[in-house]
Image: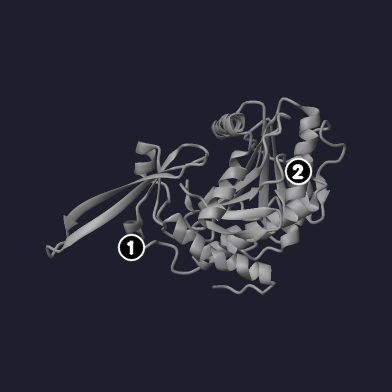
């Protein structure tokens, strides 16, 4: 039903002194998307620039006077919602304020602030601020679906710091809805539909069951969400969260779902922080076409740190091959990350690693 396919290759040569060396590579196929990735553990032996400590953003990025997301500038520097979405200029839930993205990616792109502080270090946010921001996103998407039912291809994303593609350090999520299907939405819809037709079940639910039985990549749970290291990662230290009981993002009233998600996101961030990675991406996709493709899945990946003179995590190999090349086996990622879920479940305080 769920297949974990991989091939292993070796390269042999000698070092400068004539000593034999053997280097191993793995090519894995993602059981959901069927895309290949490549894992090259020997590259972890290289010095990774920007990870010797947790770097802070430069002073120019910490200047609140020019930040449109800070309270003093918010009213005058951020756009207002389309009246089809709300009669209010912006949506608010708790500390989260949501408004249109001034530079939209889709017909319906918005920004959801999750903290009034200008800069929140990775892994240090308060869970309720993420929860409120997720709920605000869900509310916005629900309104979009009513206003434009054909805009069914939806996502919630985060680019934390410029190392992950963020243009502003002020903490925020991005939320999108489009009529035109994206590549990843198309793959999700196709693969989930094929799996359901053949087996009568959700592909993510079956993946989660298989991973829990194997136990090598399963990390832990935060209530309704369960977490594992991606078998064939599309980025560094990629972690997935799966909510087997949910299939739609349009659930702003279900606070517990979003609270549980916030806890898992922060556990992942704390893991990245322990690696001195200060930048990361988050993505949560949904096809809201009322067919009820079950299970929500969120993916998080660490990115090159926002620091002076770092090496990009995307190279010519990826451009040439279309395969992501990472350095760490997912089984090792799960083993390293697991302690952050155990601490969370035990209610123990978190300290910087």
Question: Camera-side residue: 15 or 314?
Answer: 15
- One can see residue 38 in this view: yes
| Left or right of 102 in this view: 48 | left
From the top left corner, tell me how far across and down residue 321 is, in percent: 36, 37
- One can see residue 116 in this view: no
Asked where in the image residue 194 lies, by quadrant, the reply is top right
| Left or right of 15 in this view: 148 | right
Identify the residue shown where x is 66% and y is 74%: 349
Residue at which label 1 appears: 45
Question: Camera-side residue: 350 or 8?
Answer: 8
From the top left corner, tell me how far across and down residue 159 is, in percent: 59, 49
Asked where in the image residue 251 lies, by quadrant, the reply is top right
From the top left corner, tell me how far across and down residue 302 is, in percent: 51, 55
Residue at which label 2 appears: 138
Dot 2 or dot 1: first in sequence order is: 1
> Which quarter shows the C terminus?
bottom right
Relative to 319, is 73 above or below? below
Q: Contact (CB < 8 A) between labels 2 and 1?
A: no
């Amino acid at each position: 039903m769920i297949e974990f396919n991989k091939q292993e290759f070796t390269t042999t040569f000698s070092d400068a002194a004539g000593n034999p060396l053997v280097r191993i590579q793995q090519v894995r196929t993602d059981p959901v998307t069927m895309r290949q990735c490549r894992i090259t553990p020997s590259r972890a032996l290289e010095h990774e620039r920007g990870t010797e400590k947790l770097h802070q953003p430069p002073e120019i990025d910490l200047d609140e006077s020019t930040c449109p997301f800070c309270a003093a500038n918010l009213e005058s520097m951020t756009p207002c919602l389309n009246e089809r979405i709300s009669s209010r200029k912006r949506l608010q839930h708790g500390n989260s304020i949501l408004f249109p993205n001034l530079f939209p990616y889709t017909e319906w792109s918005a920004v959801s602030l999750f903290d009034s502080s200008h800069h929140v270090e990775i892994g240090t946010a308060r869970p309720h601020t993420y929860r409120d921001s997720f709920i605000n996103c869900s509310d916005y998407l629900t309104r979009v679906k009513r206003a434009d039912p054909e805009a069914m291809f939806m996502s919630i994303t985060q680019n934390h710091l410029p190392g992950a593609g963020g243009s502003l350090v002020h903490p925020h999520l991005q939320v999108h809805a489009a009529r035109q299907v994206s590549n990843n939405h198309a793959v999700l819809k196709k693969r989930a539909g094929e799996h359901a037709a053949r087996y009568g079940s959700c592909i993510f639910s079956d993946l989660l069951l298989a991973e829990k039985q194997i136990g090598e990549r399963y990390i832990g749970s935060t209530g309704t969400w369960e977490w594992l290291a991606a078998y064939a990662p599309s980025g560094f230290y990629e972690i997935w969260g799966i909510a087997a009981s949910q299939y739609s993002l349009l659930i702003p009233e279900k606070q517990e779902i979003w609270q549980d998600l916030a806890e898992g996101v922060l556990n992942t961030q704390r893991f990245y922080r322990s690696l001195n990675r200060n930048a990361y991406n988050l993505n949560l996709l949904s096809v809201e076409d009322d067919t009820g493709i079950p299970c929500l899945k969120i993916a998080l990946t660490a990115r090159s740190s926002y620091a002076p003179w770092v090496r990009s995590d995307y190279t010519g190999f990826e451009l040439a091959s279309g395969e992501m090349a990472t350095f760490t086996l997912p089984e090792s990622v799960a083993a390293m990350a697991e302690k952050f879920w155990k601490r969370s479940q035990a209610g123990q305080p978190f300290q910087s690693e």
